[in-house]
Image (cartoon, rainbow, N blue to C red):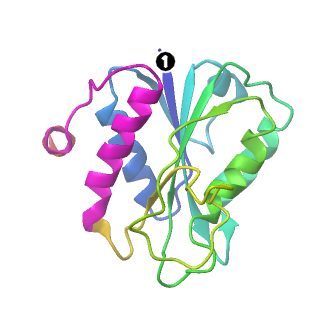
Amino acid sequence: MKIGVFYGSTTGATERAANQVALTMRQHVTIVRDVTDATVEEFLSVDALICGASTWDIGELQEDWAACLPLLEGVDLSGKTLAMFGMGDALTYSWNYLDCLGELWETFSQTGVRLIGRWPADGYEFDESRALDDDGVLLGLGLDDDNHPELTPERLYAWLAQVSDELGLGRKLVPPADNQTRAAS
């Protein structure tokens, strides 16, 4: 299975998380790309997409993704799988925490892609989010490096284990401690 990790990052937090995803799942990751440089062909060249975004201003999608999504409108991603993670600030922007996931899904849901990696909203404190599905579950993993950076490694690893299972890959993941060591060298 070939996995592509696509992200948009303004401050570097989403890029760091995307790189952690790539390190943890490196056995299957063939592309790690900032969406400002991504092509439709790259989205089509992989079996599974792991996409990372952040919410900006008041519920807006990060600008690189906002520019990229129109390229994907009308693209047929049937047979491919999508998992998403989002960065947000649940305390300051409690009324639109992780809206970026809802924005991404609005476009991707029209492409025929299958969504995996939904994540429980338990343990998060926010008032509203477009990232919630009809069952009150997040459309993907939520990360909040502004208020709870200490939770990011554990949440990311647990979510990737779930995504790996949903993809039928088993749990051949590189633990966070090994990633930190390898990333620093």
Q: Is residue 141 visible?
A: yes
Q: Where residue 128 sits: x, y (%)?
A: 62, 75
Which of the pair 8/92 is nearer the observer? 92
- Magenta stretch: dominant SS? helix
Identify the element where label 1 is drawn: loop
Name the residue type under label 1: Lys
Tell me: residue 84, above or below residue 93: above
- In the image, 148: left or right of 91? left
How far across and down, in percent of the image, does residue 132 sit? 62, 60
Q: Which residues are magenta?
A: 150-179
Q: Which residue is mark 1?
A: 2
Q: Vertically, is 15 above or below 182?
A: below
Nearest the eye: 87 or 127 = 127
Q: Quadrant of residue 55?
A: bottom right
Which quadrant holds residue 75?
top right
How many neighbours does mark 1 have within 10 angstroms: few (below 14), some (14-19), or many (20 or more)?
few
Q: Residue at x 68, y 64 (%)?
A: 130
Q: Is residue 62 visible?
A: no
Looking at this view, name the residue that lies furthest to the front: 135
| In the image, residue 68 lies in the stretch drawn in magenta | no
Residue in the picture at 33% in, 53% down: 155
The answer to whether 97 is drawn above or below residue 39 in the figure is below
Position of 164 relative to 47 (above/below): below
Which residue occupies the extreme top position in the image? 1
Closer to the camera in the image, 125 or 4: 125
